[in-house]
Amino acid sequence: MRLQLSGVVKDYDHRVLDHLNIDVDHKSVAIIGPSGCGKSTLLRLLAGIEFPQRGEIRVGQWDITRENIKAYQRTIGLVFQKHNLFPHLTIRRNITLILEKTRGMDKKQAEKRADELIALLHLEGEKDKKPDKVSGGQAQRGSIARALCTDPELLLLDEPTASLDPILTHEVLMAIKDLRALGKDFIFVTHEIAFVKSFAEYVIFIDNGVIVEHGDVDILTSPKTEGLAAFLRNVTYD
């Protein structure tokens, strides 16, 4: 999956992303950096939820523009910091509803696909429960199952374990690792450096809205910039 950024600028009331330029081609790309550095904003741009003030973004074969955003978004799956499931629906119905409304599946087809994903994410015992009746880790795995239900080419994950305790964090990260066998591409934001080292092929380190360092995952062992070295000294990883 090729990711290309050319002069990307994003402003709110201040400059959040400042002329990002990169061209990488890897199956699993991690975006890391301190809180407030712009990494989640970048992921929102990659998802087409927001657009930059200036610059161009290309993901795979797609130039991300307002004109083709709906078609592009049909090829991706999104997982946010919190599970974002419909609270009044069961885990299973959260999945079947998407399939019926966006892919035109009938009830039987949708339930078959949902049950396949529920089994993949080890949620068989929770599928008929609503999100507030399962653990945070189970709800987040339900979110991942829903993101996978339309068979996206690319999964975008924005700190999917940010609101979870260490045990549930491990549970969700192991579920994401299990998805590698599906052949999907991944771009993810995380503060879990041990997970980055074991799952990512490529790492982008952002600080204060700029790309300070990027490269193969080995840069986490031998950073070339003091910015990345200082960041790694302040996080816990194995």
Image (tube, rainbow, N blue to C red):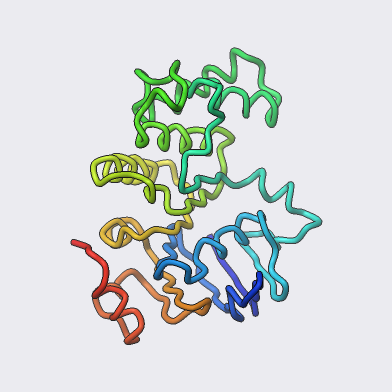
Q: Quadrant of residue 104?
A: top right
Q: Residue furthest top?
A: 108
Percent x, y of residue 48: 66, 56
Q: Quadrant of the C terminus?
A: bottom left
Q: Is residue 110 above or below residue 98?
A: above
Percent x, y of residue 192: 31, 58
Residue under the point 61% across and 73% down: 5
Instruction: State the residue in front, 11 or 67.
Output: 11
Q: Is residue 205 above or below residue 91?
A: below
Percent x, y of residue 89: 55, 21
Q: Residue furthest left?
A: 238
Percent x, y of residue 121: 38, 31
Q: Is 135 positioned to the left or the right of 12 in the image?
A: left
Instruction: State the residue in front, 218 or 211.
Output: 211
Q: Is 218 positioned to the left or the right of 157 in the image?
A: left
Q: Residue furthest right?
A: 67
Q: Is 44 positioned to the left or the right of 155 in the image?
A: right
Instruction: State the residue in front, 14 or 93.
Output: 14
Q: Quadrant of residue 134?
A: top left
Q: Is residue 68 above or below residue 125?
A: below
Q: Is residue 193 above or below residue 85?
A: below
Residue under the point 70% across and 61% down: 64
Residue under the point 54% across and 50% down: 154
Number of dots carrying numbers: 0
Q: Residue furthest front?
A: 13
